[in-house]
């Protein structure tokens, strides 16, 4: 293709032969080349003109040697199940730390595996340089907890009101029962390339005021310090976050194939200083705003339904997120930032729920170096949900619920009792609290003792319901 004739246009094949790599810059390059073509320039001259815009060949990054980057362990084993869990967590963290971008790591007392070996575990923290790893915050981006001090409100009245207001399960609210999303936030979604798509925009409006399924909950209890009633909600960014995660993983995969094909797909990253990285970082901040607004909407609606008058403070904190500190990006998968100014709205206090029969801890972080500045997000599990159900034997979920939550008002939004969310399916709350203290990860300032809660429960997927109707 060295002919100097101007009878045919410059194509993408010409650009590739000259050393240009296909990408979003191709249309502009082709337009310029063909403008020159129309002016009578030959291919040799056009090639010379465009040589300065050939991107440098990317440096391929290999996996680090096992153990080259160590990680901090803030976890102990009190019985064989915990020992087995720690072995698995250690194995997956060792593989994770081979990722070329990772410079430090830590595991919390609630750590447990969350996928194939090499996947960041729940209770894991990984600090990366110039890299945002979508797989390290997972699809449930910005899963978070928010607490409102409700003063002397009756806990049962609050729980009843919350049950009439909240929405668990898949999907969003039907037309006519939706909560309002801020138009400013919606416009910000439209201005971001990762969020400006019909599915994200629709879900952002339909899912406002919803809590999802699985381990998400709405908890009501009393402060041990003040005796005042408090409400705590737990959920993430729902559909908008899941769609952002999917798009982020697709972009990260393109970079992975080019820059580090040895890296497992779940650990692909977007260079933070790239155009895509900057847009993704902004998208994460918008998803954070959406999630906080979602919590606020549910709290406010409950206050109004319960006719609660005087209220006290309200604060929240997130996990399954990415936090920038200095020149590193800290990925907390089921780990909570424990330094005072991790965000502009940080209060210095964070919440650590344990299980439905135990208090929610109100803690002040210690910014421990051996925790990379993080603390646990909850109690974690020593074995899978299916293993817990297997161990139940002939005991029914209802019988187990009665035995493990005596005196508490426990409700499952889906109706039936989800045994995989009962206290026995989680790690020992006492052990987790003891390890928080032993490793000096956070200072416990208060305990919100449970009155009761609403759990999402085991909601069958929509496709299974359709199948049964057939």
Image (cartoon, rainbow, N blue to C red):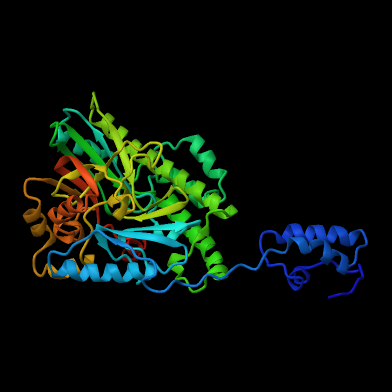
Q: Nearer the viewer, residue 365 or 416?
A: 365
Does residue 46 sit above or below 274 in this rendering? below
Among the 4 quarters of the image, the one containing residue 87: bottom left
Does residue 219 sit above or below 21 in this rendering? above
Residue 385 location, x and y as percent?
Answer: 22, 65
Classify the position of the C terminus by image quarter: bottom left
Classify the position of the N terminus by image quarter: bottom right
Task: Write the residue at 6% across / 49% down.
Answer: 406
Q: Nearer the viewer, residue 423 or 376?
A: 376
Task: Write the residue at 34% across / 36% down.
Answer: 296
Residue 251 location, x and y as percent?
Answer: 54, 61
Residue 261 location, x and y as percent?
Answer: 52, 73
Among the 4 quarters of the image, the one containing residue 446: top left
Left or right: where 98 falls relative to 406: right
Task: Write the residue at 27% across / 45% down.
Answer: 366
Does residue 438 sit above or below 180 in this rendering? below
Left or right: where 255 falls relative to 332: right
Left or right: where 18 falls relative to 360: right
Q: How many marks?
A: 0
Residue 6 location, x and y as percent?
Answer: 91, 67
Asked if residue 465 shows in the view, the reply is yes
Q: Nearer the viewer, residue 154 or 449?
A: 449
Asked if residue 213 shows in the view, the reply is no
């Amino acid at each position: 293709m060295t002919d100097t004739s101007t009878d045919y246009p410059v194509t993408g094949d010409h650009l590739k032969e000259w050393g240009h790599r296909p990408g979003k810059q191709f249309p502009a390059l082709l337009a310029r080349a063909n403008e020159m073509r129309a002016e009578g320039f030959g291919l040799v001259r056009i090639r010379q003109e465009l040589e300065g815009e050939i991107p440098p060949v990317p440096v391929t990054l290999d996996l680090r040697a096992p153990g080259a980057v160590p990680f901090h362990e803030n976890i102990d084993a009190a019985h064989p199940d915990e020992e087995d869990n720690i072995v698995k967590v250690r194995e997956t963290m060792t593989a994770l730390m081979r990722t070329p971008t990772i410079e430090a790591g830590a595991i919390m007392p609630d750590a447990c595996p969350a996928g194939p070996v090499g996947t960041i575990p729940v209770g894991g923290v990984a600090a990366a340089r110039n890299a945002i790893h979508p797989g390290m915050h997972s699809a449930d981006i910005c899963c978070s907890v928010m607490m409102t001090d409700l003063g002397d409100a009756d806990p049962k009245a609050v729980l009843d009101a919350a049950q009439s207001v909240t929405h668990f399960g898949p999907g969003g609210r039907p037309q006519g029962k939706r909560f309002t999303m801020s138009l400013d936030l919606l416009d910000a979604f439209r201005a971001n390339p990762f969020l400006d798509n019909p599915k994200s925009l629709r879900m952002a409006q339909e899912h406002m005021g919803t809590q999802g399924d699985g381990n998400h909950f709405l908890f009501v209890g009393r402060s041990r310090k003040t005796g005042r009633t408090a409400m705590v909600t737990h959920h993430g960014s729902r559909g908008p976050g899941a769609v952002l995660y999917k798009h982020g993983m697709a972009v990260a995969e393109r970079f992975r194939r080019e820059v580090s094909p040895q890296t497992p797909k779940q650990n692909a990253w977007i260079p933070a200083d790239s155009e895509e990285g900057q847009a993704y970082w902004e998208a994460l901040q918008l998803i954070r705003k959406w999630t906080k607004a979602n919590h606020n909407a549910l709290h406010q609606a409950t206050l109004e339904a319960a006719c609660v008058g005087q209220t006290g403070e309200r604060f929240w904190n997130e996990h399954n997120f990415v936090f920038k500190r200095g020149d590193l990006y800290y990925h907390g998968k089921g780990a909570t930032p424990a330094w005072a100014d991790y965000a502009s709205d940080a209060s210095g206090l964070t919440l650590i729920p344990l299980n439905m029969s135990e208090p929610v801890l109100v803690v002040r972080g210690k910014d421990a170096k051996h925790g990379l500045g993080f603390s646990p997000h909850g109690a974690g599990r020593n074995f899978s949900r299916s293993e817990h159900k297997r161990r139940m034997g002939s005991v029914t979920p209802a019988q187990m619920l009665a035995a493990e939550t005596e005196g508490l008002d426990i409700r499952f939004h889906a109706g039936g009792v989800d045994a995989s969310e009962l206290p026995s399916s989680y790690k020992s709350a006492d052990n987790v609290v003891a390890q928080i203290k032993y490793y000096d990860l956070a200072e416990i300032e208060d305990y919100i003792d449970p009155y009761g809660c609403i759990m999402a429960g085991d909601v069958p997927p929509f496709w299974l319901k359709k199948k049964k109707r057939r």
